[in-house]
Amino acid sequence: MQRSQRKPPNKKSVKGEKKQTKPDKETQQMPNLIPSISEIVPTPPPNQVRQTCRPDQTPGWKIIIEYGAFIFSAVAVVIYYLQLDATQQTMRLDERAWVSVTSAKLTRPYSVDSKGMVLVSLANTGKTPALHMKVEKAAFSDKEDAVDLVPTASAETVAPPNSTQNTIPLAIHLGIPGDTKLFIKFVLTYRDVLQKPSDPPHMTTFCGFYPPDDAAEDRTTLMACLHGGNSMN
């Protein structure tokens, strides 16, 4: 009697059951790179060294040298600026306008009833023009000591540098006899291009006289006063 050979039943895969796959060789050979929590070692705190401030150890001679160098530098700067200012002042004196009176001629006779006229000739010996040049004050008298300056009306003019042909007319006041000795004094003011608006104007002061009729001198030319009175600044 033959036994029936029964085959074992096939194991059916259950739905949802995952097949177990064998790991790859690469996966098996890859080391575990992620450290575990127990392997992380905290960084030890840095060694805290207590520091104390020491007093300044700079020697005294070095401090003296440093202060001396500072004072020397300050003095050198002051001297430099003083020299620069002196150089500028010298340049201004050399370049500025210088106006002087060369002559004053009587162009119209004066008398008690009529005004005389004087033509004042001026020279600018400077290297820059004289601006706003005019007679600021004038005085007429028969005595040199009695000449009192009073404001007078005069037109402004300009004197070019290194020029001699500059004239300003000046009227003689009424009431002076034509045969007497006449003293004339006037103040001329002007400015130059190197001046600041706040600077005072330059002044040229002149004093002269006409001799009387019986004198031998020419009455058409103004003579310089015996006691001076002429100046420039």
Image: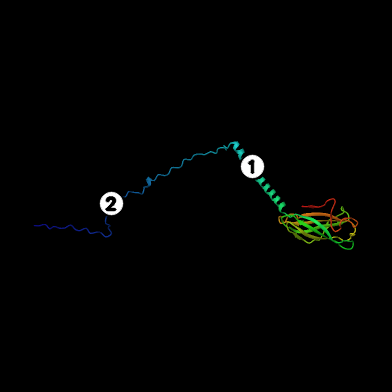
Left or right, 174 with respect to 81, comes to right
Q: Quadrant of residue 189?
A: bottom right
**Residue at coordinates 28% horizontally, 51% vertically from top-left?**
25
Neighbourhood count class around disc 2 (C-alpha, 10 Å): few under 14, some 14–19, many 20 upward: few
* Residue 168 drawn above or below residue 26: below
Percent across and percent down for residue 200 are 75, 54
- Badge 1 marks a residue whose secondary structure is helix
Q: Please tell me which of labels 2 and 1 falls first in the chain.
A: 2
- Report the residue marked by disc 2: 25
Q: Quadrant of residue 18?
A: bottom left
Q: Quadrant of residue 163?
A: bottom right
- Badge 2 marks a residue whose secondary structure is helix
Left or right, 134 with respect to 114, comes to left
Percent across and percent down for residue 186 are 82, 56
Between the residue at mark 2 and the residue at mark 1, the CA separation in whole angstroms equals 86 Å
Labels 2, 1: front one: 1
- Report the residue marked by disc 1: 72
- Amino acid type, residue under disc 2 in the picture: Lys
**Residue at coordinates 29% horizontally, 52% vertically from top-left?**
26
Percent across and percent down for residue 138 are 83, 57
